[in-house]
Image (cartoon, rainbow, N blue to C red):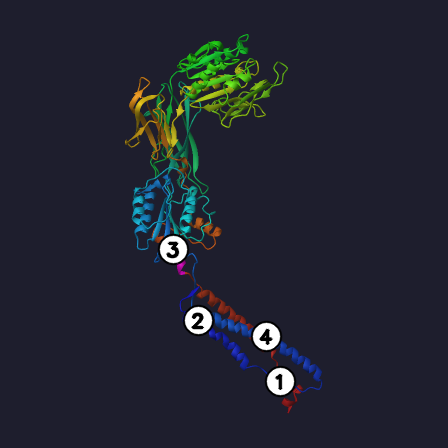
């Protein structure tokens, strides 16, 4: 607390005036003549005690009245403990939001442009800090300490660009507090230049700011007008000759209803009709949503690129389009290895697998069958998948050929049965199978009790086969081999109610192992006679040959591994063409893969091998798509005053100042630093005490009655 005119505090000495007057004007008890002196003495003592008590109360009231009046005249001002003084040198951490939501643009200027302009004012103004650190919310580069090179910060700010992902403001503030912790500056501050997007400020109110003031520069200016596509789902059943379904999720952050037109484009051509949608205005609870669906049938085995787009322009262009890249491979060659034969038909596992493989599109899957004793390494030449139907055992050479085949990218599918020797499998394929094969459990036959298999509908082999979960047929298992010592990287497709895997997968090397602990025939289960058997077998094959529309779509900022798919001999490099036409050159790692990390810009990236000798007839090429983080399409904001109130409730004494510009924030901080003048409040207390004093003083005077003349001989005389 300070005083405008501290010299007037000398008036506090006036508080002693009532005490001095009380001592000078002390009242002597009058002498009374009365025959019964005993009663007179008792009455006088009682009256004296009451008068002493009442006089002291009046004394205190009058002394307090004069003291408070003198204090009020001196004009006391209560200053904020976390106040900010613009003319003092201080240390500051500057946090600039560079998430995609800052790309909202009005009248040719984006929110990010406004943030950089206001931050530059701080770095170049008369009240600039002496030591700073600059944190970009969506940048992996983080400052290790504060420095006085303000020009370097200005240069870094001018070169900054927007990046994908949510701006984690709370995490940035935590880093800022760590940077300021050991700084010896008398004044510290954290500046935040952001659009106040609600999702960016989650958990900030929970953070203890250690009484470091927060300066919030709100760069949003006005409510945005924006309809974006925040997600695009592509159906799991992606194969040539079948319709692939695209489901786009639209989100409206605008304060008014919006009508938009949405369309699908594949390989540069619009597919089908444009869809018209009307989205209600966003509310205080958040934006509104709807979905739009498209379908397209791919017929050629190659890389297909496309997009779902909103035709209308709005304040945020980056989320008006959602891109995709699907790679469909060629014909899948499959070897079916026949084990012990049965009577044929539904009770012969090899026959049931042959029917399923041949029922698929004739062009898609080409099957060849060999007997188990004739199977060898040569059987796997030019093959993408191999199915083993109740093969009793494997020789060391056969097992080595299978392991090498899987490691190089093939798929090996084992259907066990009564003839399978678990000990041989465990010995030959140790470390390759999803687990160790134990004993077979369960009984078979018409009277035997079966178990209802539990289906993992999230697995790619089952996902999206039917519209509803209830439409999936029941799988009854009577007998199966129990797996032990399961690997941590296995994934169940079907399992028993107790959790034992019935069909499970495990990636090994560049390929995959699929293990069915039951038969592919009707002998131990009803799987082969249900509508699930054919799509499971088909998807295993199509995934092996990359004909199952491999989705080469990534979020901005992701590291993308590019695999040409064939061995490249000699020194080799990749050319990656960026969405803006710029070309990046990458060396191929061991002639087979390259990792590309410059994916900050949404769009279609195309690559091709420009050096080195390919093992195939054509030079490998491909493409992948990059999209912004869909969460950035939710532009609902949080009011700065609401955020400030919440932060203050959790951090007693901390200052939170906000405004649309740096000048407004500094003005708010300066007003808080000027303090609160208590003059008017103290005058109100003085008036109240005057009223109390008058009431008490009048009460005293009514109680002082003169002595009657007939009781006082001196007056009577």
Of the two numbered discs 2 and 1 on the same chain, state the one appearing first in sequence. 2
Main secondary structure of the magenta stretch: helix
Residue topped by disc 3? 185
Mark 1 against mark 3, which lies toward the viewer?
Answer: 3
* Residue 493 picture location, percent across and down: 51, 23
Residue topped by disc 2? 9
Q: Residues within 10 Å of mark 1 (few under 14, many from 20)?
A: few
Mark 2 against mark 3, which lies toward the viewer?
Answer: 3
Mark 2 against mark 1, which lies toward the viewer?
Answer: 2
Label 3 secondary element: loop
Q: Residue furthest front?
A: 396
Question: Depth check: 439 or 50 in front?
Answer: 439
Which quadrant: the N terminus?
A: bottom left
Of the two numbered discs 2 and 3 on the same chain, state the one appearing first in sequence. 2
* Residue 687 picture location, percent across and down: 49, 69
Boundaries of the magenta span = 669-674
Q: Which mark is residue 54?
A: 4
* Residue 361 picture location, percent across and down: 42, 14
Q: Is residue 262 visible?
A: no
Of the two numbered discs 4 and 1 on the same chain, state the one appearing first in sequence. 1
Which quadrant: the C terminus?
A: bottom right
Q: Residues within 10 Å of mark 3 (few under 14, many from 20)?
A: few
Whether 694 is drawn above or below 639: the answer is below
Residue topped by disc 1? 30
Q: Quadrant of residue 572?
A: top left
Of the two numbered discs 4 and 2 on the same chain, state the one appearing first in sequence. 2
Relative to 71, 710 lies left or right: right
Q: Residue furthest top?
A: 343
Label 2 secondary element: helix
């Amino acid at each position: 607390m300070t005083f405008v005119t501290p010299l007037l505090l000398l008036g506090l000495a006036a508080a002693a005036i009532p005490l001095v007057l009380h001592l000078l004007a002390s009242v002597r008890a009058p002498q009374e003549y009365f025959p019964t002196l005993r009663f007179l003495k008792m009455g006088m003592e009682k009256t004296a005690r009451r008068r002493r008590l009442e006089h002291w109360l009046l004394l205190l009231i009058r002394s307090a009245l004069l003291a408070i009046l003198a204090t009020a005249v001196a004009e006391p001002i209560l200053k904020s403990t976390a106040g900010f003084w613009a003319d003092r040198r201080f240390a500051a951490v500057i946090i600039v939001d560079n998430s995609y939501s800052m790309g909202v643009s009005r009248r040719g200027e984006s929110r990010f442009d406004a943030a950089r302009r206001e931050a530059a004012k701080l770095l170049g103004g008369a009240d600039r800090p002496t030591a700073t650190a600059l944190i970009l919310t969506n940048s992996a580069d983080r400052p290790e300490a504060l420095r006085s090179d303000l020009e370097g910060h200005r240069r870094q700010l001018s070169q900054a660009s927007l990046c994908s992902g949510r701006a984690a403001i709370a995490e940035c503030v935590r880093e800022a507090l760590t940077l300021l912790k050991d700084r010896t500056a008398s004044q510290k501050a954290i500046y935040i230049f952001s659009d106040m997007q609600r999702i960016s400020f989650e958990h900030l109110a929970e953070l203890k700011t250690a009484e470091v003031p927060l300066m919030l520069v709100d760069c949003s200016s006005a409510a945005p007008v924006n309809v974006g596509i925040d997600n695009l789902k592509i159906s799991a059943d992606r194969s040539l000759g079948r319709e692939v379904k695209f489901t786009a999720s639209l989100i409206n952050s605008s304060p008014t209803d919006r009508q938009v037109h949405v369309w699908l484009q594949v390989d540069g051509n619009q597919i089908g009709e444009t869809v018209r949608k009307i989205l209600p205005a966003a509310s205080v609870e958040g934006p509104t949503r709807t979905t739009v669906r498209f379908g397209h049938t791919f017929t050629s085995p190659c890389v297909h690129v496309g997009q779902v787009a909103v035709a209308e322009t709005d304040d945020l262009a980056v989320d008006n389009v959602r891109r995709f890249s699907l790679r469909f491979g060629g014909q899948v060659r499959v070897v079916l290895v026949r084990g012990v034969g049965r009577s044929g038909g539904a009770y012969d596992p090899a026959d049931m697998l042959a029917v399923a493989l041949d029922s698929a599109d004739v062009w898609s899957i080409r099957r060849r069958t060999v007997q188990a004793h004739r199977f060898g390494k040569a059987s796997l030449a030019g093959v993408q998948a191999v199915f083993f139907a109740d093969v009793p055992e494997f020789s060391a050479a056969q097992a080595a050929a299978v392991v090498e085949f899987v490691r190089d990218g093939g798929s090996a599918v084992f259907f066990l049965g009564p003839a399978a020797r678990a000990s041989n499998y465990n010995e030959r394929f140790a470390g390759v199978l999803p687990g160790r094969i134990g004993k077979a459990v369960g009984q078979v036959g018409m009277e035997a009790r079966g178990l209802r298999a539990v289906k993992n509908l999230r697995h790619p082999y089952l996902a999206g086969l039917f519209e509803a979960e209830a439409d999936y047929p029941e799988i009854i298992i009577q007998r199966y081999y129990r797996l032990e010592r399961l690997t941590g990287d296995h994934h169940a497709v079907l399992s028993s109610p107790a959790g034992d895997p019935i069909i499970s997968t495990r990636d090994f090397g560049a390929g995959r192992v699929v293990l069915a602990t039951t038969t592919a025939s009707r002998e131990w289960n009803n799987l082969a006679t249900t509508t699930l058997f054919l799509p499971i077998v088909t998807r295993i094959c199509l995934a092996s040959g990359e004909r199952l529309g491999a989705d080469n779509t990534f979020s901005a900022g992701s590291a993308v591994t590019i695999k040409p798919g064939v061995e490249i001999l000699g020194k080799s490099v990749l050319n990656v063409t960026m969405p803006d036409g710029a070309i990046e050159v990458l060396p191929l790692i061991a002639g087979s893969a390259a990792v590309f990390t410059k994916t900050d810009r949404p769009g279609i990236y195309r690559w091709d091998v420009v050096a080195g000798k390919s093992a195939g007839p054509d030079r490998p090429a491909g493409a992948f798509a990059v999209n912004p983080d869909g969460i950035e399409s939710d532009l609902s904001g949080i009011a700065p005053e609401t955020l400030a109130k919440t932060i203050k409730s959790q951090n007693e004494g901390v200052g939170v100042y906000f405004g649309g510009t740096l000048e407004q924030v500094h003005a708010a901080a300066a007003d808080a630093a000027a303090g609160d003048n208590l003059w008017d409040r103290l005058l109100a207390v003085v008036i109240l005490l005057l009223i109390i004093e008058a009431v008490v003083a009048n009460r005293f005077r009514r109680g002082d009655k003169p002595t009657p003349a007939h009781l006082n001989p001196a007056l009577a005389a």
